[in-house]
Amino acid sequence: MKRISPAALIGLAVLIALPFVVRYGFAASEKYYLHLLIQILIWSFIYTGWSLMGRFGLTSLGHGAFTGIGAYVTVLLWNYAGVTPWLGIPVAVVVAIIVALLVGYPCFRLRIVGHYFALLTLALTEFVRLCIVGLRDYTGGSLGTQPARYGDGVSLYALQFEPDRVLSYYIALALWLVGLYVWWRVDRGMDRYALDAASQDEDAAASVGIDVTREKLKITAISAAMCAVGGAFYAQYQMYIGPETIAGLGVSLNIVFAVIAGGMWVMLGPTVGAVFTQVLSEVLRVTIQSSAGLEKLLGTAVLALDTLIYGLLLVLFIIYMPKGILGTLLERRKKKAAVPTASPAQVFPRQT
Amino acid sequence: MDCQLDIFFLEAVLNGLLLAGLLALLALGLNLIFGVIDVVWICYAELVMVGMYGIYYAQKGGVPFLAAALLGIVLIAIAGMILHYLVIRPVLDSAPINQLLVTGGVLFVLQAAATMAFGIDFKNIGIRLGSVNVLDMSFSYARIVTFGVAISAMLLLWIFLQRTYIGIAIRAIAQDRQIMPLMGVDQRKVYLVTSAIGGGLAGLAASLMVLQFDIYPQIGLQFGPLIFMICVLGGLGNMIGGFIAAFIISEFIAVGGSCFATEWGYAIAFLFFMVVIFIRPQGLLGGKS
């Protein structure tokens, strides 16, 4: 059943060869380019995790909570109990899944959807962020904290690999591939049809024997687990975690925006979103810093320019391009190729 | 860490009451807009932030405070209309969640624009109203004034909605948006007026908040989640429910904050909110689920 297209194989080969291309092509700033690539891969994994729920109309603003749980549980277990991340990450994932189910079960039983679901999960994000700040004796409060370095910083036991960027890249690449595999399994599975049906009309879905609550809980657990793993790897790579950088409303909104920008219904949509957002902010930063005139004109304001452009694009995307960059491109190609297909003009099917 | 029933506890309770006035005012604008247009402005607190900057700079430019406050109200009322016209109108027919996310984009824009234009440092309007001491308790006049103005504004809005033609039209649209256009009410006009009133309320809240809080671009993130929580707890669109919820939440924040640390007051409030929503998903006074 599993069939990998030649294009995918070529793409994979390019990705595997990429560190060497960077080494010989951009030797001067090898570390910088690898860092950018690793960031893109880790965030792509997190975005893919969110899109598993998002594509079925479950717009969660709570995934900043799960990335935060993943990062903080792993790091705190390592720093205070000496538990290796090999155990710490599974524990973090279990905690994230428990939180997801505790919030998800009542939501899905009581059919909390749309605005209410988004605002309730927003409250979850805030709750987790406040807990992180409140436990400042352990978490460092709003200043954040660092995982304790083990040896020279590259260790299998401590799952620390930051100084070796090439190794980090391959780990991030493997993580990203796992994310795509999960997406592919969900997309091909029966659950997808059940959830598609439920997102269109819950009553109709239930009437044909779909256990809507169970299906939604399943996808929520997978999605939360992926975000927790992503948060943990982010912490292991960055070697720094802060309540604003890996938890909180800002992270939640960034996740949602990147996925909408890239495309929510296609496998590589979240990845395109990650490439787009990361490259946009880096290009802006570099162009402005390299031009003395612009820097003088804008000063420290530069730091906010990428957010300003994100925000504007988010508005424009939702109004004019709800299927995202990749979704729109693929659709256009398909249209050119042959049959005109009916296209839902909205990011989500309207629920009543 | 002391949580005895002493005078400080009473002080916390009363300060919570004063905070509730402001939060109720903030929630009212959002509820009005949701009730009528069926849209959640996620960027509502950011409009307040823009208003605060507007008042700050107007006052710094020599405008007397009351005139600056009035200017702030008008400014944000216009901003509300622009927001509705440019951003909300194109997505009125798409899924509710799109409308929420589109204003999320506006949130980013306003916050980043404020950071670029005004910098990230804390600004204070520099008006000190002093405080009053009762027994061993101390209450700042700024809070008392805020409470009084907020409550009066809510009463005025109530009278407006009950007594004027456009007010009645607004309430009618909120009840049945299909029928009202057939009765000769111009829906677009009502939406625009509602957006202006909602913005004006945000501007009023801004003019009260500059008396109590420092102004910085991220202040919206501090208040935004609280306001949404209050609106949902009271039942989205239910103005009386929002009013009651504001008092409940601010007591949790004030008392929890004085017994433990400030963050725990907020954390307990959010936890309480989630538990209540699981028991009554439509909110305390919400009718439809």
Image (tube, rainbow, N blue to C red):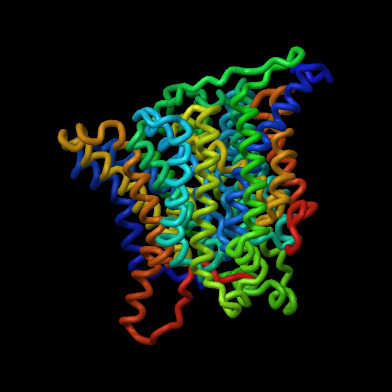
In the rendered structure, the answer to whether residue A15 lies left or right of residue A111 reads left
Most extreme residue toward the top is B136
Residue at 55% in and 71% down: A349
Q: Classify A192 as above or below B27.
A: below
| Residue A87 shows in this picture | no
Residue at 74% in and 18% down: B1
Q: List x then y, in percent, for residue B78.
A: 43, 52
In the rendered structure, the answer to whether residue A205 lies left or right of residue A55 reads right
Residue B95 figure quarter: bottom right
Q: List x then y, in percent, for residue A59.
A: 57, 58
| Residue A245 shows in this picture | yes
* Count of numbered tags: 0
What quarter of the picture does the C terminus of chain B occupy? bottom right
Q: List x then y, in percent, for residue A337.
A: 32, 82
In the rendered structure, the answer to whether residue A222 lies left or right of residue A252 reads right
Q: List x then y, in percent, for residue B37.
A: 56, 63
In the rendered structure, the answer to whether residue B273 lies left or right of residue A305 reads right
Q: Classify A1 as above or below A108.
A: below
Residue at 67% in and 21% down: B139
- Given residues B99 and A248, the one toward you in this image is B99
Residue A12 figure quarter: bottom left
- Given residues B34 and A46, the one toward you in this image is B34
Residue at 74% in and 45% down: B244
Most extreme residue toward the right is B5
- Given residues A139 and A12, the one toward you in this image is A139
